[in-house]
């Protein structure tokens, strides 16, 4: 098939291999590369002057300046089987389609929840009639969109995010896996949000009292999204009081994969409902046990492997249950290490078998070619 992936964001195809980028930017690049490796003709349109082509993916520019849309003439080619817009509004997608000298099939691949303003147009039957399909990143998100928008079921699809290529096949066999993991709890926090760090430090203080060799590495920093780390500055006094806490900051995917390879437990106590969470999949691919909540699509992305604490059992100002669960998992690791390692290695195998971008590329082609 000849496909165009269109995402007005400042990145290029190789950005995820070079610098920290958003999950959506990384997903678009990884999917484009895997589609091309499967033999499809792929063009990536993004807001960049770097026309860096690689892996047989053609890269071209599209952007909006002073409310004026401009795009490379490659989009005028009439033989595209589909134009797939990433995180766009229906109005924008259709305005681009109407500017073309042909009538392309247009698909929306979106991370946005039902109440996001950008999705307002999905409630307009006339616009939905002109869109070939809506591609969600979780069944949770899909069901929520269907609850408020009258979208035909045959136009609703799910294409979940997958693990970065850097997280694939990190271990040769169970022996190497067990040798890479410490018997002491080595905890990690990778959420870009800093709002739960105070809780992390409180939980880790209890862990540290029981396991003197335990560590907590914080791979979090909002500079990845253009913001400063003022919040973490306010928390530094706490980190000085509790030994074993290391604030690393956000890393590129290749750096994070190398770091998580040696960690054992991921703490993700988010109470904010999100439509996806690739951090969970990648942590499990690195053999890290995930302790999180059931907010949004977290349970779905945990693939029945993560430990999901019900939000009904938690209060925003009192997450003692989460702290207790953290201690329980640390005790399991410390006192039943082989069983713990066996469990985590099985999840490594399962994630590699079911959640790679090569698999997602095949799933996309299937949904684009399946008869409704």
Image (tube, rainbow, N blue to C red):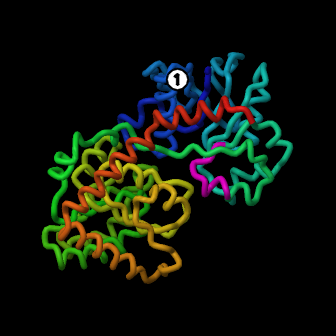
Q: Nearer the viewer, residue 312 or 247?
A: 312
Please give left or right for residue 127 compared with residue 5 in the image: right
Label 1 element class? strand
Q: Position of residue 143 (x, y in %)?
A: 67, 57
- Residue name at image x 82 percent, y 40 percent: 129
Q: Position of residue 195 (x, y in %)?
A: 43, 68
- Residue name at image x 53 percent, y 78 percent: 312
- Residue name at image x 65 percent, y 53 percent: 142
Residue at label 1? 59
On screen, residue 198 above or below 134: below
Q: Quadrant of residue 82?
A: top right
Please give left or right for residue 288 compared with residue 117 in the image: left
On screen, residue 353 above or below 4: below
On screen, residue 207 above or below 49: below
Q: Position of residue 138 (x, y in %)?
A: 57, 52
Circle 1 Cα neighbour tier, 10 Å, few/some/many (<14 / 14–19 / ≥20) = many
- Residue name at image x 61 percent, y 29 percent: 62
User: Quadrant location of the C terminus?
Assistant: top right
Q: Quadrant of residue 243?
A: bottom left
On screen, residue 45 above or below 140: above
Q: Position of residue 294 (x, y in %)?
A: 50, 67
Residue range (magenta): 135-143
Residue positioned most to the right: 126
Please give left or right for residue 146 compared with residue 264 in the image: right
Q: Magenta stretch containing residue 142, yes or no?
A: yes
User: Quadrant location of the N terminus?
Assistant: top right
Q: Quadrant of residue 241?
A: bottom left
Q: Magenta stretch containing residue 208, yes or no?
A: no
Q: Nearer the viewer, residue 243 or 152?
A: 152
């Amino acid at each position: 098939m000849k496909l165009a992936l269109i995402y007005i964001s400042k990145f290029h195809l190789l950005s995820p291999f070079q610098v920290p980028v958003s999950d959506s930017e990384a997903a678009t690049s990884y999917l484009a590369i895997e589609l091309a490796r499967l033999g499809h003709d792929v063009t990536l349109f993004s807001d960049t002057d770097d026309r860096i082509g690689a892996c047989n993916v053609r890269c071209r520019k599209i952007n909006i300046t002073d409310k004026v849309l401009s795009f490379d003439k490659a989009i005028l080619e009439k033989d595209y089987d589909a134009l797939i817009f990433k995180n766009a509004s229906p109005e924008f997608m259709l305005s681009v389609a109407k500017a073309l000298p042909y009538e392309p099939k247009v698909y929306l691949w979106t991370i946005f929840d039902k109440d996001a303003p950008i999705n307002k147009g999905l409630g307009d039957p006339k616009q939905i009639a002109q869109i070939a399909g809506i591609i969600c990143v979780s069944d949770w998100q899909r069901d929520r969109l269907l609850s408020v928008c009258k979208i035909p079921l045959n136009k609703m699809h799910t294409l979940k995010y997958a693990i970065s290529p850097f997280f694939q096949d990190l271990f040769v066999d169970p022996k190497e896996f067990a040798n890479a993991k410490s018997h002491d709890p080595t905890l990690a926090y990778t959420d870009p949000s800093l709002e739960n760090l105070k809780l992390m430090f409180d939980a880790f203080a209890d862990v540290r009292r029981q396991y003197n060799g335990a560590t907590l590495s914080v791979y979090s920093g909002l500079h990845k999204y253009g913001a400063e780390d003022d919040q973490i500055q306010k928390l530094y006094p706490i980190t000085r009081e509790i030994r074993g806490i290391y604030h690393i900051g956000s890393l590129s995917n290749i750096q994070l994969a190398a770091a998580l390879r040696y960690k054992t437990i991921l703490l993700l106590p988010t109470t904010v409902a999100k439509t996806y969470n690739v951090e969970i999949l990648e942590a499990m691919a690195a053999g890290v046990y995930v302790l999180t909540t059931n907010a949004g699509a977290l349970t779905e992305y945990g693939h029945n492997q993560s430990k999901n604490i019900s939000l009904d059992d938690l209060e925003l100002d009192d997450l003692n249950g989460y702290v207790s669960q953290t201690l329980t998992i640390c005790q399991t690791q410390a006192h039943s290490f082989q069983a713990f390692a066996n469990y985590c290695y099985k999840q490594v195998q399962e994630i590699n078998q079911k959640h790679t971008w090569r698999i997602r590329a095949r799933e996309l082609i299937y949904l684009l070619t399946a008869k409704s």
